[in-house]
Image: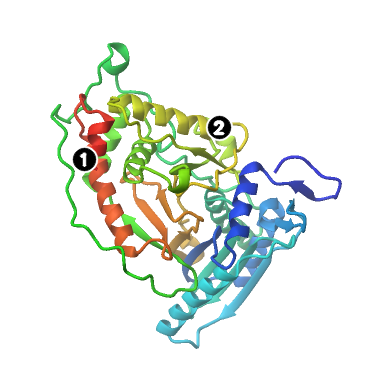
Amino acid sequence: MSTKTEEPGTEHLSPFQAGLLAQVRRRPGTGVYVDHVLIGLTGTLHPYVLAEAWRELAYRHAALRAGIRDHADGSAAYRSDGRPTWRAVDWRATRESVREARLRERLDRERAHGLPLDGTPLSRTLLMRCGEQDWTLAWRFSRLVVDQWSAAVVVAELFETYRALLAGRCPKPATVPRYPDGLTARPVPARTPRSRAAGGPVPAPGLPAQALPPARRLPPVPDDGRPPHHATPFDAVDLDLGASAAALRRMCRTHGMVPAAVLHAAWLMLRPSGAGGRPACEAVLPRRPAGQPGTWDAVGSRETAVTLPAVPDVPRPLLPWLDELSGRLTDAVGSAHGVPGSGTADSAVFAGEAELPRPDLLDLGLKVTAAHYDARPHHALALHLRPGQDLPVRLTYDRTRTPRSTAERLTARLRDLVGVLAGASPRTTVAELGAGA
């Protein structure tokens, strides 16, 4: 959000928001950039107090009452003068199996319906009572006004405000999300790599300087499986990198790189070209630099995008290429202004997102049993690098363009390739790795 217009309460969209809006217009009825947060709770909950806590947050953060008005001439304006939407339903009389199916169907239907671009808030909250002591909070919002990092801030502040209201005191700011484990922030190298001091790369500690191990070949999977009918065309596959995660972090500490750069490189090798000359991949990052904690508690749309360079087709050493990718990512995160997402890339990698908190509420007789974030970008394939020491990864895909068999095969190949990158010989070139992938 930037320049004010003459109409009170209205602002122009940022370049990145405008890029997301173009994709929402282009694919109506698919639920792109309609994200869900689901919080499971068990214990004693006071629903009216929680609703009041939500209203307090909406008063505090303009993004929670923000909407976008789509004009007939193709322009759009951002408004922050709406009222939050909160609903509560009682499903205690419904059997658990029926209740879960009904919830999934409702969320899919609402996502496919989308959120109106008429200036009303692009945020909807539903509190469901599932049993005498069981509750589910479902928050649906548009990525146009709230990014994933902001969602983590809102969840933390919601329960801190709920606690304060129950105690009859003024709410205090909650602990903001911690910057995610150096995914997009360069670590200080454990020692100066000879690759920069003397022109030759060195292996990470604990990794032998050996020839490139061959990538595990997976049997080809036919891509003719027709996607089943669903209310929205998206699905996801989760990936555990296993032992490769620890080796990858050691490599990055040694050479002053970011893990996100290595995962981006592996994804570029698996997705080498774009159709029709389009860029193959873009990185989507939060503009919340590790050295600027003041940006961590901001709620809104603060993402930025950078088009990733193609895999070099010359025998270039691996480490300098990874260093270049690291520089691009850290520069994009630290930029003062968002840049437009290209909107034309076949795939994207989302990195540096905050993990949803699970606050300790046992002193209130309440426990958070689940906290899930479900994102739906417009890309046919999108890789989400999630917070955690084990570098968990999620692949979201469009079922109308990519069968699940292909998505599962890609995640398996990605795990193998990350392991190869982390254990590569100092003499390895990008071309050798590309041939192995």
Q: Amino acid at mark 2?
A: Gln
| Distance between the alpha carbons at the discs numbered 1 and 2 | 40 Å
Residue 110 picture quarter: bottom right
Q: Residue 46 versus residue 193: which sits nearer the camera? A: 193
State the residue at coordinates (68%, 67%): 85
Q: Amino acid at mark 1?
A: Gly
Q: Residue 306 versus residue 355: which sits nearer the camera? A: 306
Query: Could you say where residue 245 lies in the image, as x and y percent from the top left?
Result: 27, 42
Classed neighbour count for the residue bearing mark 1: other residues with Cα under 10 Å, few (<14), some (14–19), many (≥20): some
The extreme top residue here reads: 198
Circle on res. 389: none
Left or right of 414, for residue 67: right
* SS state under label 2: loop
Q: Are marks 1 and 2 in contact (CB under 8 Å)?
A: no
Query: Could you say where residue 8 lies in the image, as x and y percent from the top left?
Result: 84, 50
Residue 318 picture quarter: top left
Could you tell me if residue 56 is visible in this image? yes
Circle on res. 292: 2
Query: Could you say where residue 244 lies in the image, as x and y percent from the top left?
Result: 24, 42
Q: Residue 163 versus residue 123: which sits nearer the camera? A: 123
Query: Could you say where residue 387 lies in the image, as x and y percent from the top left?
Result: 40, 46
Camera-near label (1 vs 2) is 1
Where 115 sits versus 199, above or below?
A: below
Circle on res. 436: 1
Question: Count of labels shown?
Answer: 2
Could you tell me if residue 352 is visible in this image? no
How does the figure colour the protein chain or chains?
rainbow
